[in-house]
Image (cartoon, helix red, strand yellow):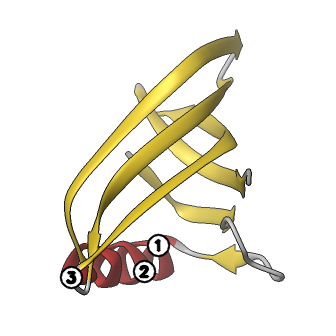
Amino acid sequence: YVHPDFTSFGENDTYLNEGKDYEIRAYRDYLQRAERVHTEMHQPEVTVRGNVAWITYYWTDSGYAEGNRFTSRGKSTRIFVRENGQWLCIHGHYTAVP
């Protein structure tokens, strides 16, 4: 579901992350450190305009990283493009909320 040209601004990122390969490496690293993660999406709003769509939502999650319990919450926008009949996420923007 990730476009080869995927970009993102993570929760605490100063700079733009670029490329599907970067996203895969970052997520793999997260999965190696985190366990028993539970994430919920709240108030999702989907908009479709031709071959472009976006979703905005709030999230809450919890789990364990390196033996310590964590929780977070935030807001997100993800942008999708339809190519060859498939919806692919081309950009994500995630903001943690205290």
From the image, state whether disc 3 or disc 1 is nearer to you.
3
| Residue on which disc 1 sits | 23
Who is closer to the viewer here, 58 or 19? 58
Question: Few, some or many C-alpha atoms within 10 Å of disc 2 (few <14, some 14-19, many ≥20)?
Answer: few
Location of the C terminus by quadrant is bottom right
Residue 28 relative to residue 56: left or right = left
Find disc 2 in the rendering and name its residue: 26
Instruction: Provide residue 87's location: percent of width, then percent of height.
Output: 46, 31
Q: Residue at x 67, y 78 (%)?
A: 17
Whole-percent x, y for residue 90 in the image: 61, 50
Q: Nearer the viewer, residue 15 or 30?
A: 30
Q: Which mark is drawn over residue 67?
A: 3
Residue appearing at x 66%, y 67% in the figure: 10
Dot 3: within a 10 Å radius of its alpha carbon, few (fewer than 14), some, or many (20 or more) residues?
few
Q: Which three-letter amino acid code belongs to the residue tagged 3?
A: Gly
Q: Is residue 59 left or right of residue 29?
A: right
Q: Nearer the viewer, mark 2 or mark 3?
A: 3
- Asked if the residue under mark 1 is in contact with the one under mark 2, i.e. CB atoms within 8 Å, the reply is yes
Amino acid type at image mark 2: Ala
Helix, strand or loop status at disc 2: helix
Secondary element type, mark 1: helix
Contact? badges 2 and 3 (CB < 8 Å)? no
